[in-house]
Amino acid sequence: MRRAPAAALPGPEPTERHDWQTLKRLIPYLWAYKGRVLFALACLIAAKGANVSVPLIFKQLIDRLTVTPDQAFIVVPAALLLAYGVLRFSTSLLTELRELVFARVTQQAVREISLQVFRHLHALSLRFHLERQTGGLTRDIERGTRSINSLISFTLYSILPTLIEIGLVVGILLAKYDPVFALITLSTLAIYIVFTVRVTNWRTALRRQANELDSAANVRAVDSLINFETVKYFNNEEWEARRYDEQLQKWTAAQLRNQYSLSALNVGQAVIISVAVTAMMWQAAARVATGEMTIGDIVLVNAFMIQLYIPLNFLGVIYRELRQALTDIERMFGLMHTQREIADAPDARALPAGPASVRFENVSFAYDAKRPILFDVDFDIPAGSTVAVVGHSGSGKSTLARLLYRFYDVQQGAIRVNGHDLRALRQNSLRAAIAIVPQDTVLFNDTI
């Protein structure tokens, strides 16, 4: 029997990013707790309704204070002040209640997905695990589960509340004032979002370049220090320092470009918001001069603008983190798309208990089709007998055990236990009937 070294099979092709498909795969895990989801959404809408009502109360308060004579001041503004405080408190209370209710949904979803991925990885073939770095797999799972928290947090606590608030504010502006106010608000938001997304995409490329140069500088430093003795032999300390400094100079230039791009983003956002607020205030002041609006209306419009634009300051960060989170989640879900090389047949049955005979029947097998390991191997092991397989290293002894455990399927022939082809048996019942003493001591990092 000759052994051919296993050729590395190509890893699974990176899946094309389909953000919507990733979200659709995630939603069922959340919707399993639809009662909590609906209650959290109700709290979200109520909190935003209370938050939008605060400027309305503030407007009424200012108008009352500017036109109400002596005694009415004691009654009406006091009620408005009380309503103002209640709405402020309600906003915070409903927000915390939403997070409290939805926390269990998020954690349960992470738990179920993690367990499902873990079980799927254990169901995959030995070939998959030998040809993939375990550290890479665990990092994919770790990043994926962490990104579920990030995705839900940014969506439920940042994007969705902002969208609801935009809808409420635009509705109030349309109902109470000239449509020009709503038009300015919507057009500003559109310009702001397009600008932020485009600049953020540009900054992402710059950041990636800076990270690559940082890694290159680190590799050069580590490589030089690992070969410390060789550097000393050739008296090359200064030359190594110059090479390291060259990489640091490139990294510094990339970092400066990244900082300039951040400043450009911040300045551009500030210009858009400043122009919008100025236009809104100009329109409001003109209407106050003609008596169409009051001082309270100016305060209301300004408060609405502040409430809308402050969350948008973080839009670039949120957009970048969302894209990264979707990428990480998709990569984790991609593990679940990996097909099982060795699977039980639909009509597979359990191996009957009791002594078992083993027969290798004209078995041929190769990890790589170009280099066969076993060719037409045929032998019997009667029940209760002792058999030793002797051969030089690489002759296929371990391969026989792997085939018996059905870590791989034979390419030709069959392996039978008590006359049953292994491919007709359930894997768990087959492996439960076999005892093994590994050549190497295997210990888990846990107590006995």
Image (cartoon, rainbow, N blue to C red):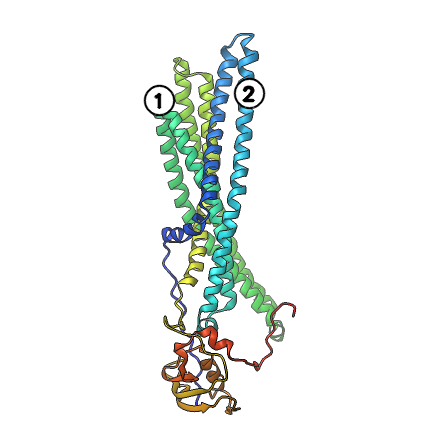
In the figure, 278 relative to 24: above or below? above
**Is residue 363 found left or right of 133 in the rendered image?**
left
**Quadrant of the snapshot with the N terminus:** bottom left
Residue lying furthest right: 447
- Residue 264 visible at all: no
Q: Are marks 2 and 1 in contact (CB under 8 Å)?
A: no
Within 10 Å of disc 2 (Cα), the crowding (few <14, some 14-19, many 20+) is some
Please name the amino acid that badge 1 sits on: Asp
Q: Amino acid at mark 2?
A: Leu
Observer-nearest residue: 246 or 359? 359
- In the image, is residue 254 above or below residue 77? below
Q: Is residue 219 visible?
A: yes
Q: Please, what secondary structure does the residue beneath circle 1 have?
A: loop
In which quarter of the view is residue 358 placed? bottom left
- Nearer to us: label 2 or label 1: 2
Can you give x and y, in whole percent of width and height, for residue 360 in the image?
42, 87
* Residue beneath disc 1: 178
Q: Nearer the viewer, residue 352 or 144?
A: 352
Above or below, comparing residue 375 to residue 10 in the picture: below
| Residue at numbered disc 2 | 81
Reading the chain from its start, which is encountered first: label 2 or label 1? 2
Q: Position of residue 326 (x, y in %)?
A: 43, 52
Give the spatial CA distance, label 2 vs label 1.
Answer: 28 Å
For residue 79, above or below residue 425: above
Q: Quadrant of the C terminus?
A: bottom right
Please state which of residues 122 and 200 is positioned toward the viewer in this rendering: 122
The residue that appears at 42% across and 76% down in the rendered structure is 425
